[in-house]
Amino acid sequence: MSSKNKKKKSAAREWLDALVFAVVAASLIRWLLLEPFTIPTASMEKSLLVGDFLFVSKMHYGTRIPKTPLQVPLTHQKIWGTEIPSYSDAIQLPYMRLPGFADVERNDVVVFNYPVEFEYPSDLKTNYIKRAVAVPGDVLEIKDGVLYINGESAMQPEEMQFSYNVVASRMLNADFFAEYGINPASLHIMSDGSYVVFATDLVIERLQGSPLITTVRKQIMSKRGEDRIFPDGMKMGWNRDQYGPLTIPGEGTTIELNADNILRYGSTIKNYEGHEQVEIRENELLINGQKVDSYTFKQNYYFMMGDNRHDSLDSRYWGFVPEDHVVGKAWFLWLSLDEFESFFNKIRWSRIFKSIE
């Protein structure tokens, strides 16, 4: 039969073919190269803002082979607009990653799967974004809110924020604070008439110059335990501003499983090292029923923190991020929208196509 006699595709078939091609192409790009991500919270302000739209590079650290291959394309946990799971965990592949051209380096801004969301497979946990402040082998410590790595003061992001208590000579409104770059979401009015603001050092310096401001005090916690802190803030006497020292484990690192190390690393071994059965009781750690006196880690781990140091749920609260949870490197912004503005004023033009440092 000649090509002239071939039956022409119907319009519906052509549309279907085009749709299938588009879905396959988008899925491949999203898996292999780039994945879009939106900043949902203020934990990285002001380095990254709520309403920033960015691309995450899968290429830098190497693309992960999907652990959960049975999944509806272009979905994550649920089918769009429903509570129906978009995947089946009937097949779970081992962790594998294609070659990349970089390792996770200290101070990289990284997108990763939220480690303690155990109800989902590791590659389908909710995506978080933080800064990798410490990598395997680093000794991390926080003193009076200042981060130290290996005994030296760590790099401070230019737009890093802390919380401050502000007292004024009269009542102030959100417009007053907006003039200093403090958005309404970063402003809280207290019952005693004072204010709590989340701001950078530069903003605070400007704010202190206002004749209406009488007192500005950084809210640094004293040396005492905080119950939500990893691994056991109350027992260790650690909190968000007084933390460590803590050594970050890595692939091939061997530790003695004494009482202190079981407290520091036991949950990491139990939850992320791939053992079928790990039991922690008193000062002992058992793997598959056998007591273990030392342990060698199977993968690298990272300590992640938000640049908004007093408004970030990060590794200080839930622990290390395993290498197999790393999604990719935050690469560049392609759009940024201000939720407190309208129409064309919503677009933060200066942030479009801005690289992420």
Image (spheres, rainbow, N blue to C red):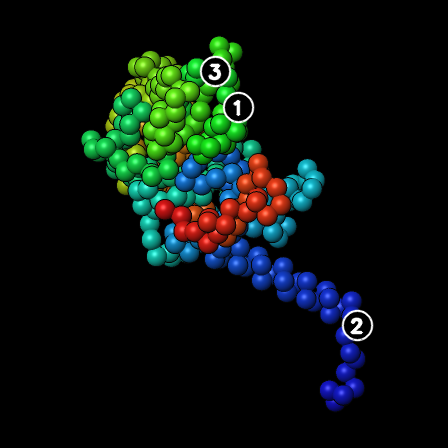
Q: Amino acid at mark 1?
A: Asn
Is residue 9 depicted above or below 319 in this figure?
below
The residue lying at 53 percent from left, 55 percent from top is: 30
Is residue 73 depicted above or below 261 in this figure?
below
The residue lying at 47 percent from left, 15 percent from top is: 170
Q: Secondary structure at mark 3?
A: loop
Q: Secondary structure at mark 2?
A: loop
Residue 26 as seen in the image, left or right of residue 187: right
- For disc 2, the marked residue is 10
* View extreme (left): residue: 151
> Which comes sooner in the sequence, label 2 or label 1?
2
The residue lying at 62 percent from left, 45 percent from top is: 343
- Of residues 278 and 9, the one nearer the viewer is 9
Q: Residues within 10 Å of mark 1 (few under 14, many from 20)?
A: few
Q: Residues within 10 Å of mark 2 (few under 14, many from 20)?
A: few
- Where is residue 109? Give x, y as percent: 39, 43
Q: Nearer the viewer, mark 2 or mark 3?
A: 3
Q: Is residue 286 visible?
A: no
Q: Which mark is residue 173?
A: 1
Cα distance, mark 3 to mark 1? 10 Å
